């Protein structure tokens, strides 16, 4: 008997922008710029997919502050511009924008753009696009545990899950581009039983076609969740 897995929540570690640019003799930031186009293309694909309800994208980690200031500043501006320019697209795609991660260190201007985009898209229904921003899974779990403790609740799997930044369903499929095979502090709790897929393709070259091929393989994986 063959059953097909349903993909509801897809998460992607968007990696390889710098190498993509280097290969072309360009500066790293050019890779991020083209990578933003891939974000649009993949979000568009997911918003029309029959079963995908949530797309979580790793955009900036708690460790990415270690990068040169110029690159960090570029990424902050790119994010601000992306959200502003793409508002029409979010509306057309009936897609809600959400975030996970600690937004506190971002500039007031960026925080305002993030809040405005969330507010403007909050009734959209087809897809939730969750950007992981200043996100680190250990940081998220510690903040969640502190929330539970401060409410004097017993610490259980349920109470901790509910206190995470991401009250979304468990992740069914995780993809990491660029050939690296590690999690880099992404969603350690939520990935417990997700299927993983690693592709050599660098993020700016990743396409809806390749995503479709990966989903096809995901559908035929044998997910057991500890059973037989
Ligand atoms: C991923 O691409 C984007 C971010 C982490 C913001 P990288 O910038 O990590 O690209 P590589 O890994 O250096 O090629
Ligand atoms: C992970 O990629 C973070 C994002 C994609 C935003 P990195 O490129 O920062 O991860 P490492 O340093 O290779 O593990
Ligand atoms: Mg990288």
Image (cartoon, rainbow, N blue to C red):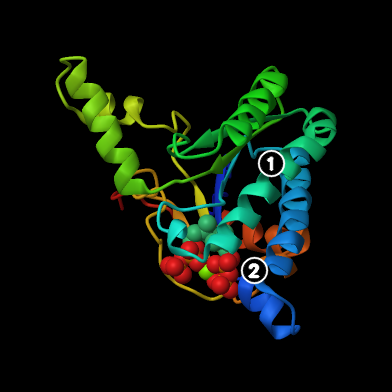
> Where's residue 135, x and y in %?
44, 46
Q: Residue at (78%, 39%) from the top-left corner?
A: 48
> Where's residue 68, x and y in %?
52, 66
Is residue 114 in view?
yes
Q: Residue at (54%, 76%) from the top-left corner?
A: 179
> On screen, 44 above or below 207?
above
**Mark 2: few/some/many CA within 10 Å (<14, 14-19, 20+):** many
Q: Are marks 1 and 2 in contact (CB under 8 Å)?
A: no
Residue mark closest to the camera, 1 vs 2: 1
Label 2, ligand 1: CB separation under 8 Å: yes
Q: Earlier in the sequence, mark 1 or mark 2?
A: 2
Taking the image as shown, residue 171 lies to the left or right of residue 70, namely: left
Residue 80, label in figure = 1
Mark 1 to mark 2: distance in Å?
18 Å
Is residue 199 in view?
no
Residue under label 2: 17
Tally of marks: 2
Residue 44, label in figure = none
């Amino acid at each position: 008997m063959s059953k097909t897995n349903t993909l509801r929540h897809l998460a992607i570690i968007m990696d390889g922008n710098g190498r993509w640019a280097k290969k072309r003799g360009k500066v790293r930031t050019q890779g991020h710029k083209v990578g933003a186009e891939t974000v649009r293309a993949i979000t568009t694909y997911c918003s029309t997919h029959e079963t995908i309800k949530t797309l979580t994208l790793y955009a900036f980690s708690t460790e990415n502050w270690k990068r040169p200031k110029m690159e960090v500043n570029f990424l902050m501006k790119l994010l601000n511009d992306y959200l502003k320019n793409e508002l029409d697209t979010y509306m057309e795609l009936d897609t809600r924008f959400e975030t996970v991660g600690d937004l506190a260190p971002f500039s007031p201007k960026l925080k305002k753009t993030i809040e405005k985009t969330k507010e403007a898209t909050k009734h959209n229904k087809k897809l939730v696009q969750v950007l992981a921003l200043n996100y680190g899974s250990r940081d998220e779990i510690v903040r969640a545990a502190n929330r539970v403790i401060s409410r004097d609740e017993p610490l259980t799997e349920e109470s901790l899950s509910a206190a995470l930044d991401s009250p979304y369903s468990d992740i069914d499929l995780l993809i990491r581009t660029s050939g690296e095979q590690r999690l880099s502090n992404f969603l350690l709790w939520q990935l417990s039983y997700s299927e993983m897929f690693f592709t050599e393709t660098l993020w700016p070259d990743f396409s809806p076609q390749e995503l479709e091929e990966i989903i096809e393989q995901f559908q035929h994986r044998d997910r057991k969740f500890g059973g037989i």
